[in-house]
Structures are given as structure tokens and as C-alpha cells.
Image (cartoon, rainbow, N blue to C red):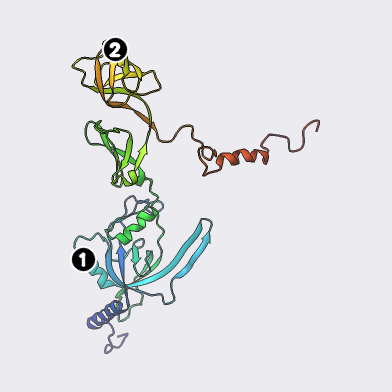
Amino acid sequence: MPTNVFFDTGTKNEQDLYEAIAIEQIKIQGQEVFYLPRKLVAEDNLFTEDRLSTFNDAYLIEMVFNETEGFGGEKELMGKFGLEMREECSFTVARRRFEELVSVDSNIIESTRPNEGDLIYFPTAKKMFEITFVDHDDPFYQVQNRPTFKLSCRTFEYSSEVIDTDIAEIDAIETSFTRDSMQYQITLEQAGAITSEMALEDGDLLLLDGTSGAGADAGDNVLSETEFLSGSILAETTTGTRLDIINNGGLSFTEGERIVGATSGAIAYVTDTLDPMGYDLITVTEFSKGEIITGQTSQVTAEIKELIGTKDYIVKEDYIVGDQSTDYNAQNDYLDTLDDSIFDFSERNPFGDINE
């Protein structure tokens, strides 16, 4: 026999004892961390990456933080895009404990080993690390056994991955750093015959105030759901196009006749007698809700229930940023004028012109 048969260093009992001691040491000296498995959504086989990865769960497990003098790596580095944090570290986790974690009912881990690209959240340092390499034989075959994984990690660089673990401290990373434009898209939610809501894709709602025509400012405002600080975005109102009228005694105006408002003095021509009635305003003054209008030909009177118009703009078209008249906060227009006396943008021959 090549080796001495009386000194066997790889018995099952020795391996189990060694593994139990390793687990106990990790539980005593280790730190509680969260392991976040990466779920691939749209893997790019050419670049072997997935920019749409999601992290939908986090599992609490003990690991040993192997660094004794702080984080390694390049640490704080001033690059061309500003300050970068390139900290590196390593964790040790017991194989058996990781397998027990995998066997938990309803978990989403699909591998029996930690994977490169998965994340580890270190609550003590409040930092998220990405696994870059999994060393499965360190320490190397003690008593012919490998009871632990050594995980080499670096600071996680967030790039709009979806993090939804139901742990507020972890999910806040996405909330704080996301640049995903899909978070800010607006879709119209059709609740009935009219549009009553505008919903952001992440579920937050913007309510169109009074779109049913029942409100005092029907259709004028876009309100945040809580109306925080009166939260209105007022659209600039163009002239009305239709009138919702009541108390007309069952009579109707005549198409083409002139109608006059008793309160506002506004004058308009009836363009059609549909419900609501169309009109074409010919005065600067607009009708007001609740006033009585009278047809100059038919002599029919009615009360205006609602003015239905178009709301086209949020910012005034003639607004100039920094014009020192309407806007005193910026100096855009002032600097644009001032630089004309400094820079000469006229075209000329750099070698001189004729007759110079």
C-alpha cells in the first residue's frame, strides 16, 4: 500500500467533526449577513451579462468577515467620473449551512453553491458586495474534506437592477440610486368612460382632478394622490370649446346664433347643439361656471353647469429662463448677451483678408 493503513486521516467521523467545528467557529466569530441570489431576466450570451437582473429575496446567514484591518482593494479612487469606491473583501460560509439555506421551502436559490454575481449585504458596514469568485477548496482538503466556501467580493456597483426583498434597508438602495426611466413613465388608466387616473409604472398614482365633470375645477389639475402641499400641476387653459348646460326648460339654442353671458358679458356663437353644446368665443372674457346665458335669436336661457375646454400647456410658451424680468434666479439670458462683447464668432480668414 502507498500509505500507512494504520493512519487514515479521512474517516467519516473525522470529517463530520471537522465540519461541525468549522460551523461552530463561524457561528461564534461570524457576522450576520444577507445573501441575495441573482435572477437572470434577459441574459446577453455575447457579453455574458444581464442588465435586467432582479434580486427578489434575501436570506439571513452567518459568515466570517476575513479581513482584519478593514476593507482591501483600491478603496476610494478619484476617476474621470468622480469618486469611486472600490473596496474588496472576502467572506467564509459553511457548505452545510448554505445547503440548509437552499433547502428552505419556497426560496428562489437555484444552485447548491454561492454564485458569482450574487450579492451579500453586510449590515454592520451597511454595504452591499458582489461575489466575484467562489473558492471551493480553501482550506485545501483538510482530513480530505472541504467544509467551507471562501467568497471573494467587491463593492456592488448598482446599475438599475430591481431589488425587491421586502427588507426596507436593502430595498432603499434601489430607491436611492435607480436611473431606470421606466420608473417614471406615465400611463393613462382608463377607469370608465373617461380617464380618471395617470399611474406611474411603479404603482404611484396621479389623479386627474374632476375629470368626471363634477368638480369645481374639472380637468384643470393633476393632483398627487395625497395632494401634499396642494400638489397641483396647473395646465394653462385655452378657451373653452363646449358648454354643459342645465335648466334650459327643454329648449335648445339655434346653431349659429349668438349667446351672451349675463355675469361675464362673454359673447360666443353656437357651433353645434350637441350635448355638451359647442361654441366659438369671440371675446377675450370667458364664460363662468354657474352663470346664465341667453340666445340672441331663440331667446332661450340656460345655466352653465361646466365649461369643457382644452388644457395644453404646463409652462408658459414665452417664458425665458434668466431674463432678469420674470426669472431672477438664473442668468442665462444676461450671460448670453454679455458674451457677445467677449467672443467674436464672425467668420474671417485666419491668414488675413484682402486689403487688410
* Residue 134 vs residue 295, the one in the foreground: 295
Name the residue carrying label 1.
Answer: 103
Q: Considering depth in this image, is 141 or 205 the residue closer to the camera?
A: 205
Q: Is mark 2 on a helix, strand or loop?
A: loop
Which of the image's four quarters has the C terminus?
top right
Rate crowding at label 2 as few (under 14), some (14 to 19) or many (20 or more) other CA atoms within 10 Å.
some
- Residue 313 position in % (x across, y down): 40, 33
In this rendering, does residue 48 appear at all?
no
Where disc 1 sits, the SS reads loop
Residue shown at 26% from the left, 58% from the top: 166
Amino acid under disc 2: Glu
- Looking at this rendering, what residue extends furthest in the right direction? 355
Single out the residue that lies furthest toward the top.
297
Q: Which of marks 2 and 1 is nearer the N terminus?
A: 1
Q: Quadrant of residue 195?
A: top left
For mark 2, what is the residue?
Answer: 255
The answer to whether residue 330 is left or right of residue 268 is: right
The amino acid beneath tag 1 is Ser
Q: Quick check: 34 above or below 21? A: above
Residue 246 spot, x, y in % from top left: 22, 22
**In the image, is residue 139 above or below residue 303?**
below
Q: Is residue 247 left or right of residue 353?
A: left
Mark on residue 344? none
Q: How many labels does the image show?
A: 2
Q: Residue 159: where, in percent of width, then height? A: 40, 54
The image position of residue 263, as x and y in percent, is: 32, 22
Viewer-closest of 11 and 16: 16
Q: Residue at x 76, y 38 (%)?
A: 351
